[in-house]
Image (cartoon, rainbow, N blue to C red):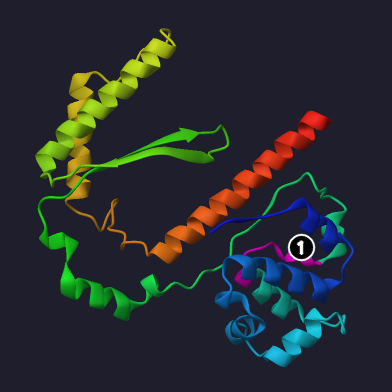
Amino acid sequence: MKITLHASTIEELQFKNIGQRIRILREELQKINKSDFTGKTVASRLPNISQSKLNFIERGETLSIDAQLLYEISKDFGVPMEIFFDDFYSNVTTKDTIYMEPKIYQSLNDSSHNVKRLKNVNPLDEEKFKLNIQLKRIASNGDYQIVSSDTTHVTHDLDTLKNFLIQIRQAIDLIDYHADQMIHSNNDMSNHFKNVDELAKHINNPNSAFPFFPQQSIEKLNELYDEALQYTTHCQEDKEKRKEE
């Protein structure tokens, strides 16, 4: 999960000491993962530190903080260690985008949870699956917006999937050509069939390129949506500011 720090937060961090910066960043993470980033839970993940000591540090009552502890905190929060020091802010403005990529602990990663799931259905036992197609708009920096997600009503075998992939690739070639007739695709029909056959080998061996993902909980999907909404709001604010300039 990637969290964007708002300009107001970056500005606030500039004028704080190390301990206060730890508190501010932790509280930002707590907005997204409340139970994972309380003072108690963070302290429990850090080596050789109690909650009371972490609270003492966060209040800014000591400037003597072990470098190893700062390193562990930066890993847990998913930020560069430099973010805790004044020098970092001499090269950063409120227009810069700073991300936090915290280490999230989800029950879906727990082996006992996955064993329980497999008692109901093991996807490797199945030969037919529903097919889902997502349509995304992708920005030049790789950010994307999902504008459509459609799933078949019935299940389909691998041969149907292969034919479907060929149709999709042909459609992509066609819309690219209509948009820019200078584009000449190197993917003729024989190449499409060859590439899809190669993909099918990996699909039948999901441990290699295409592993199965466990179904996401509603809570997790809501978290991902909230993260995307927060980032989009930041993009809108940035666009409005640049208009004013």
Residue 226 percent location from the top left of the image: 54, 56
**Which residue: 64% across, 46% down?**
233
Residue 33 percent location from the top left of the image: 56, 70
Residue 49 in which image quadrant? bottom right
| Of the pair 200 and 153, the residue shown nearer to us | 153
**Which residue: 87% across, 84% down?**
62
The secondary structure that dominates the magenta segment is: helix
Q: With respect to residue 51, does 95 lie above or below?
A: above
In the visual, does 169 lie left or right of 239? left
**Which residue: 82% across, 31% down?**
244
Residue 41 percent location from the top left of the image: 59, 83
Q: Is residue 83 magenta?
A: yes
| Of the pair 232 and 52, the residue shown nearer to us | 232
Identity, as a three-letter code, of the amino acid under mark 1: Ile
- Would residue 227 be visible to someone looking at this image? yes
Q: Secondary structure at mark 1?
A: helix
Residue 162 percent location from the top left of the image: 16, 36
In the visual, does 20 lie left or right of 130? right
* Classed neighbour count for the residue bearing mark 1: other residues with Cα under 10 Å, few (<14), some (14–19), many (≥20): some
- Would residue 183 be visible to someone looking at this image? no
Residue 106 in which image quadrant? bottom left
In the visual, does 126 lie left or right of 108? left
Q: Is residue 176 magenta?
A: no
| Of the pair 9 and 193, the residue shown nearer to us | 9
**Which residue: 68% across, 71% down?**
26
Q: Which region is colored magenta?
A: 75-84
- Which residue bears the numbered disc 1? 83
Q: With respect to residue 47, does 192 lie above or below?
A: above
